[in-house]
Image (cartoon, helix red, strand yellow):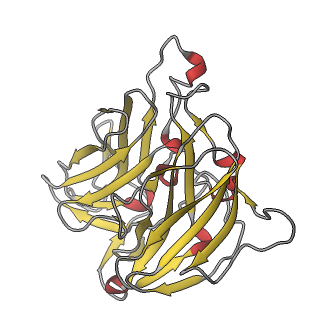
């Protein structure tokens, strides 16, 4: 059994935006909404085009170059000589296995900005993009409930499959029917495009790495996706089931029957997507085990 002090981090995110045309720099800017500490080693981004373009929905992050990462226009973290020195975009994917750069943790305050400059080299037109950073608000430090958590005997709770129209924020809701403790560090979000005859448009594939998350809200406590700007949108790849590690620790939380966990997603595939999410739960009802499999207690 382990013990855990929660709640923990939230995601500080930029507004969703359309990029410039190919060969042009564009900036993704995160504006801090309250004092706290950011972890720049776990920055994640997504850049994707939509199905209205010639080649359909596709991940454009690997063919982007990040030429600058700065705080308040200074503290340059990407350097080099020559024309457009930079880091391959996939080094900031939420699907990467490791943090490739030991960037610092930095204390920031309201109004501070963190910007990443991307050099977009895809000739197929504009794309959607966003930037997100793990963030520990000062108000969370030293607080929270100390929950005893077992190593086993969890159950998986899943939200109903929900359709999300393109370019529309869609809430997916999970209503708890069992008291227990959930671990949002292991939240999994899935988004897929329904198969059609237009296979070349990438329909019928996993769209999670190409989409965003605008809200993670348990009950009405606090939104775990934050930022000073219009509709902050975090990279959904940070919650994809195929991610290689957990990039954000949203904490463990106690739930009771009737509590609702709402996740709001945003996608611009050009077609309707099917979405769902799941979280692990340790039932606190029924003794130490709380779980029975095939009629047998665990």
The single residue placed furthest to the top in the displayed view is 197
Q: Is residue 202 left or right of residue 123?
A: left
Q: Position of residue 5 (x, y in %)?
A: 37, 79
Task: Give above or below for 34 relative to 177.
Answer: below
The single residue placed furthest to the right in the displayed view is 82
- Residue at (43, 22) in percent of width and height: 194
- Residue at (49, 87) in percent of width and height: 107
- Evaluate whether residue 46 shows in this view: yes
Give 39 or 65, whichever is nearer the viewer.
65
The single residue placed furthest to the left in the displayed view is 258
- Evaluate whether residue 283 shows in this view: no
- Residue at (59, 66) in percent of width and height: 116
Q: Quadrant of the N terminus?
A: bottom left
Give 266 or 297, whichever is nearer the viewer.
266
Q: How many marks?
A: 0
Q: Position of residue 100 (x, y in %)?
A: 72, 66
- Residue at (33, 82) in percent of width and height: 140
Give 12 or 76, whichever is nearer the viewer.
76
Q: Position of residue 6 (x, y in %)?
A: 35, 76
Q: Is residue 258 left or right of residue 233?
A: left
Q: Position of residue 237 (x, y in %)?
A: 52, 50
Give 6 or 149, whichever is nearer the viewer.
6
């Amino acid at each position: 059994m382990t013990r855990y002090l929660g709640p923990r981090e939230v995601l500080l995110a930029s507004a969703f935006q359309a990029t410039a045309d190919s060969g042009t720099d564009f900036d993704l800017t995160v504006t801090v909404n309250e004092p706290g500490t950011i972890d720049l080693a776990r920055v994640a981004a997504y850049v994707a085009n939509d199905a209205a373009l010639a080649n359909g929905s596709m991940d454009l992050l690997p063919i982007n170059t990040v030429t600058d990462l700065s705080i308040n226009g200074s503290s340059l973290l990407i350097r080099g000589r020559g024309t457009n020195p930079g880091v391959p975009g996939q080094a900031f994917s939420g699907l990467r296995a490791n943090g490739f750069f030991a960037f610092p943790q930095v204390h920031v305050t309201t109004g501070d900005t963190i910007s990443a400059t991307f050099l977009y080299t895809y000739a197929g037109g504009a794309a959607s993009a966003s930037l997100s950073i793990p963030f520990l608000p000062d108000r969370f430090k030293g607080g929270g409930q100390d929950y005893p958590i077992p190593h086993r005997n969890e159950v998986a709770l899943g939200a109903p499959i929900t359709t999300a129209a393109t370019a529309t924020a869609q809430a997916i809701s999970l209503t708890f029917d069992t008291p227990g403790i959930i671990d949002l560090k292991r939240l999994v979000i899935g988004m897929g495009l329904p198969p059609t005859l237009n296979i070349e448009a990438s329909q019928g594939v996993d769209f999670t790495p190409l989409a965003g998350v605008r809200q993670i809200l348990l009950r009405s406590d606090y939104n775990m996706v934050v930022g000073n700007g219009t509709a902050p949108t975090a990279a959904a790849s940070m919650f994809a089931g195929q991610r290689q590690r957990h990039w954000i620790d949203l904490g463990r939380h106690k739930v009771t029957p009737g509590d609702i966990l709402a996740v709001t997603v945003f996608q611009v595939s050009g077609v309707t997507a099917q979405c769902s999410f799941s979280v692990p739960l340790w039932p606190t009802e029924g003794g130490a085990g709380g779980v029975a499999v095939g009629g047998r207690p665990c």
